Image (cartoon, rainbow, N blue to C red):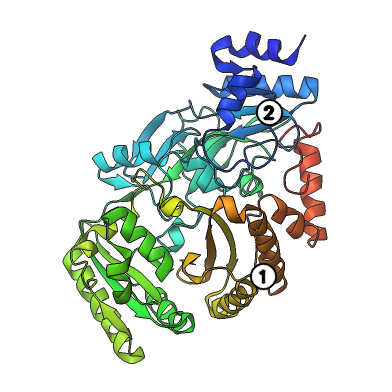
Amino acid sequence: MDVGKQLIEQIGKDHVLTGPDEIKEYMEKGGDKPFGEPRYVVYASNTNDIKKVIDIANHNKISVVPASSSVHFYGPCVPYHSGIVLDLNRMKKIENIDPRNRKVKIEAGVTWGEIQPIMEEKGSMIVSPLFPHAERSVLTDYLERTPPVIPLFEFAEPLLGMEVLWPNGDVFRTGSASVPNYPNSIAEGVNPQGPAAMDYYRILQCAQGTMGIVSWANIKTEFIPTIDKTFFISFKDIEEVIEPIYRTQRRRIGLECLLLNKTNFMKILSEKFGINPKTMSKNIPPWILILVLSGFKRRPLEKIDYEEKALKRIASELFLNISESLPKAEGIERQIPGLLRKPWGGATYWKLSDNLRCRDIFFITTLNQVGVFYKTISEILLKYEFPLDRIGFYIQPIEHGRACHFELNLYYDENNSKDSIKEILIDLATNLFDRGGHFTRPYGELAKLVYKRTYAYTKVLKEIKRIMDPNHIMCSGALCF
């Protein structure tokens, strides 16, 4: 029987796209998809649907690519080889909101725009990355280890127990969610480790769908602070930022903490607050560190007070330019904490403002190395004569400054720079990799660069892939597979 007919018979006609026109329309929605087109698109409604698609794909030796977001920026949801796109966007259940254990159970299709308002009604929130798109899947961003804007150690691993369907068709649960009769058991699924001595969730992180499909997961939540106080710390040079971040993070000062350059900060201000960049530009420094002090239910004012005193002591020792507001933009500081805890709400996503496209390159490093990488990037972009006002930087401390997420955003006119931007990205990635940049999430062409240089790691991945996916149906052609 034809694969399309099998899918329709097992999943239902209303949940399967097989016609070229309807598939083309589907692919034109939702952002950057630079590879091939699928032969079929299947909308899954539950775990059983996912398993049926995997069984059909194994039987017919056809590739399956899971997708749970409506918006894609890096193209991981598109098959390199013609196959099935398994769309999980209709899996929307939000269950077991548990303030005591600070967790919630969500399915793969739940987006940032859907979960945060529900959690806010309960006085809680999910720690989010920097302004995620409202139509992005929460689980996708967490599986891809997109860094949160709160660099506390306890939020470095927001995923708890989860259910995964391995490519061989087995249904599996990780951590304490793997106990018999879960959720009707003494275990509450909040421990991600195990079973036994192996942390299976590690296999799924940053795998871009090549190792399995997560149908649901328990994720960490946090109470919404009762009081916040925002500080802006200005810097002329990126080297000046390193010691202040180290000192504030070692002393656990603040909740949200992130560093933006002038280009990115102005894009956010202009899109979110309607501020004229020309009017505001002279008042914005080349680099600005945003630090939010927060107090929770227990003695919030005292917490804010001692953190502020510690911050001002550091500012005095290092001669920092610290402010509680922005000139000609007074009042914005009161809105910053709420904005950082929600998805982007504007009609135009902030990275796509001014009718420009955006390509990102990001990696993990240590804070004391950011100056070296910044110099390397500046030299390469100068060689290509890339406009300085279209270069964005975002530095996100991780786990109290133990490491950091270094992100470069290149804003370009798609009609004039589409081909040259690929050349620039490859040149940048090659040089940054040579200087020690740790690319944990390489997409597209960058994956070839990373995996061909990590022989031992690639060899182990391929062996795990052979066990979990004997027919190589999951995202065939992605990463090193």
Q: Identify residue type, mark 1.
A: Leu
Q: Secondary structure at mark 2?
A: loop
Using the image, determine if residue 357 lies above or below residue 466.
below
What is the number of the mark on residue 127? none
Give residue 312's quadrant in the image: bottom left
Q: Identify residue type, mark 2.
A: Pro
Quarter the C terminus occupies: top right
Give residue 427's quadrant in the image: bottom right
Using the image, determine if residue 201 lies above or below residue 391.
above
Viewer-side residue, 24 vs 113: 24
Quarter the N terminus occupies: top right
Viewer-side residue, 218 vs 270: 270
Using the image, determine if residue 14 lies above or below residue 355.
above
Instruction: Report whether 371 appears left or right of 273.
Output: right
Q: Residue at x 62, y 38 (%)?
A: 77
Residue 168 at x, y = what percent? 74, 29
Q: Residue at x 42, y 77 (%)?
A: 245
Q: Secondary structure at mark 1?
A: helix
Residue 272 at x, y = what percent? 30, 54
- Asked if marks 1 and 2 touch (Cβ < 8 Å), the reply is no
Q: Residues within 10 Å of mark 1 (few under 14, many from 20)?
A: many
Instruction: Report whether 11 appears left or right of 480.
Output: left
Visible residue check, residue 31: yes
Q: Residue at x 40, y 81 (%)?
A: 244
Residue 179 at x, y = what percent? 55, 34
Question: Label 1, on which residue?
Answer: 432
Viewer-side residue, 385 vs 187: 385
Residue 247 at x, y = what percent? 40, 80
Give residue 150's quadrant in the image: bottom left
What is the number of the mark on residue 38? 2
